[in-house]
Amino acid sequence: MVGPAGEQVGIVRIEDALRLASESDLDLVEVAPQAKPPVAKLMDFGKYKYEAAVKAREARKNQTNTVLKEIRFRLKIDTHDYETKRGHAMRFLGAGDKVKAMIQFRGREQQRPEMGIRLLQKFAEDVAEVGIVESTPRIDGRNMVMVIGPVKNKAEAKAEARRATQRADAKAANEAVKAGTEKVDTTPDKAPMTQSLADLLPDGYSTTASQEAAEEAAAQKVIDAEVAAKEAAAQEIVDREKAVQDKADKEAAAAKAAKAAEKAAAEAPKAPAKPKTAEKPAAAAKPAAAPKPMATPKPMAMPKLSTPKPASKAAPRSTPSRPKPGTSD
């Protein structure tokens, strides 16, 4: 087992190691499980994870991602345009990126490739302070291409830019301190009576020492502010990640609880539904209707006697006609 300060404790039992961890309010972490016997260490695991995350962020911040920038020329480019293109190329190379210089030929310009080679060689000489030629000029269809790489890689360029910014800030702070000391009147008519040891030192020494101390304090203040800003940014990122993780855990727990509730509801026997009887309000008692007057009886109509119709007279019978004489039947 390894102690919290990296000291070798020796081979101990698991119970003793756990007891030591609980007494020292630390975690017992197994760092080499394949070793015989396995190696464990007493440490603050939360602090270890935080430091590992900070180191990973710093490594990603200093990671170099070289980008290939492209600058295009024409064979008859003007002087001012050429200077502008050269300035862009120097800025890209100073930032640690590669530059791809391309000359476009049109029409009969393709018959004069030596003019393009001379222009690219001039361009390479002009940016030689911050870049070197990685790929010589070559013909690519109607274009002539040359690749120039930076002298310093991107990590070095970033570090140099950061140092330059820090130096500029420290210089500005020193100038402000000097301007403040010049405005103070240090020659009063009558020197005040003090018990400071600075009164016993020479005037030039005290002034120089105070200026140096002020400069050192200003530089230290700038450095402390940068360190505090970095720590605050790292803590903010860690808090944000923790909040996102907590939110995801809460959503997962809520979804799990809802699923369990649905399952329990599905498995529970359903009770027979009781018919809903709408309770009607009791109707108000209606007042008794007044008795109707009895109708007077109507006289019954006498039946009419029908008179018998006279019998129809019988039709007279026809007498057979007698044959005329001299005719046979």
Image (spheres, helix red, strand yellow):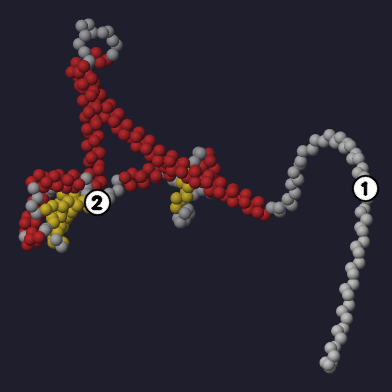
x, y percentage for residue 81?
11, 46
Relative image position of residue 125 (x, y in whole percent): 9, 50
Q: Which of 305 and 286 is in front in this view?
A: 305
| Residue indicated by mark 1 | 300
Rendering quarter of residue 84: top left
Residue at horizontal 22%, vertical 32%? 168
Q: Which of the two residues, 262 or 243, is positioned nearer the viewer here? A: 262
Give the spatial CA distance, label 1 vs label 2.
Answer: 127 Å
Q: Where is residue 77 in the image (x, y as percent from the top left)?
A: 9, 50
User: Left or right of 312: which side holds 201?
Assistant: left
Amino acid, disc 1: Met
Count of marks placed on residues: 2
At 25% from the left and 24% from the top, the residue drawn is: 214
In this rendering, the answer to whether 285 lies above or below 208 is below
Q: Name the residue at the top extreme.
A: 190
When the figure is inspected, residue 40 is found, relative to residue 307, above or below; the finding is above
- Residue 281 position in % (x across, y down): 77, 38
Residue found at x 92% / y 53%: 303
Along the line of sight, the residue nearer the viewer: 266 or 274: 274
On the image, which quarter does residue 190 sit in?
A: top left
Which residue appears farthest toward the front when viewing the image?
Answer: 325
Q: Which label sits on residue 32?
A: none
Tell me which corner region of the image, top left, top right, bottom left or bottom right, holds residue 163: top left
Q: Which mark is nearer the camera, 1 or 2?
A: 1
Q: Is residue 149 visible?
A: no
Horizontal arrangement in the rendering, residue 241 relative to residue 271 (left or right): left
Residue at figure coordinates x 21%, y 29% from the top left: 171
From the image, tell me which residue sits under label 2.
67
Q: Which amino acid does label 2 sit on?
A: Val
Which of the two labelled residues, at mark 1 and mark 2, occupies the earlier sequence position? 2
